[in-house]
Amino acid sequence: MACKLVILFFFVNLLMQIPKVRATVPAIIVFGDSTVDPGNNNQVSTVLKSNFEPYGRDYYGGQPTGRFSNGRIATDFISEALRIKPAIPAYLDPKYDIEDFATGVSFASAGTGYDNATSDVLSVIPFWKELEYYKEYQNKLRKHLGKDEANQRFSESLHLISIGTNDFLENYYIFPTRSSEYSVDEYQSFLIGIASNFIRELYKLGARKVVIGGLPPMGCLPLERTTNMFFGSDCIDEYNDVAKDFNKKLRGAVTELKQELGGIHLVMSSPYDKLMEMIRNPSHFGFEDAETACCGTGFFEMSYLCDNMNPFTCSDANKYVFWDAFHPTEKTNAILADYVVKTTLAEFQ
Ligand SMILES: *[C@@H]1O[C@H](CO)[C@@H](O)[C@H](O)[C@H]1NC(C)=O
């Protein structure tokens, strides 16, 4: 008996000394909207830009990059946590080339949505065009690394999608076109159909690791609270409910796609609850304000209205959940990224 125990301990010991085999992620490929756009819109003729101060004032060198934040965005922190690099460059930024993009690239465009009609509103890059850029990137990387190595890399890279808020807040609830055509429920299904097809296309292009983000509590963005001024500037419950409902449907679609697409590692990340926790209990995270933004008066400013001429901008963005009326501060992005890395992305590390 004692002898068997000794042998057992020997094997347990041996097993514990074998290093855990880790799946490696050589690159992060990003698609989506301003939540993950590191500056593609700088190269696009749109009014939706942020490549001027005070944007980026807490970024490396205090540089405005086109990120809609005072510093880094969530995908930068995710890239760092996966030990790849501290920031993911924008595909259209001429300062970078295929060698930089080989370890991570973002095709995202602020203001865009699943729906073509959403990207039309502010003339930004439509979602389908992001996929066209990805195909172009794949060809460039095959030339750069050789076909086999490049293809291997596409299958091992983490493909991350973060988009959808603008379809509701910049499109459905603003313009009558979609809202007269579709009920909210139908519009959600329409968008999720586009999301599913996008993932199928990625799969055809060799992607095997995909994470798609759900919607945030979009009724609590400072701009939405401002429109709710006559009701005490509370969060707009209707929008939050739409987000929760959308996330439930998206989760269902993800489950189906996993059945359909053999060998895919597809997960959905939902920052909804974590962001809501910060909004409901800001002091727990060291924040002082979760209702108004740091930039300007905090009620409505973003893009060109959030510039250095605005005298009201706060001095310490770390006290705020939101940087401008629509986007989180770097600190919020870091907390969300850390949460996603430790939960949803655990299987990719
Ligand atoms: C969006 O536009 C592109 C290009 O015109 C088109 O190929 C695609 O089918 C459109 N998507 C939807 C869902 O209508």
Image (cartoon, rainbow, N blue to C red):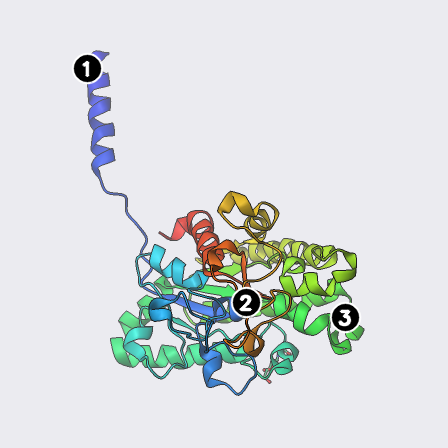
Q: Nearer the viewer, mark 1 or mark 3?
A: 3
Please provide percent x and percent y for residue 277: 57, 47
Q: Earlier in the sequence, mark 1 or mark 2?
A: 1
Q: Residue tagged by mark 3?
A: 182
Marks 3 and 1: in contact by CB < 8 Å? no
Taking depth in this image into account, of 209 and 108 the one nearest to the observer is: 108
Q: Report the residue that reaches farthest toward the front.
A: 311
Disc 1 and disc 2: Cα gap in Å? 70 Å
Is residue 223 visible in the rendered image? The answer is yes
Q: What numbered label is drawn on residue 39?
A: none
Three-letter code, disc 1: Cys
Q: CA distance from mark 2 to mark 3?
A: 35 Å
Residue placed under numbered mark 1 in the picture: 3
Identity, as a three-letter code, of the amino acid under mark 2: Cys
Is there any visible trace of residue 261 in the rendered image?
A: no
Residue at figure coordinates x 49%, y 61% from the top left: 329
Given this view, does label 2 or label 3 mark the residue nearer the observer? 2
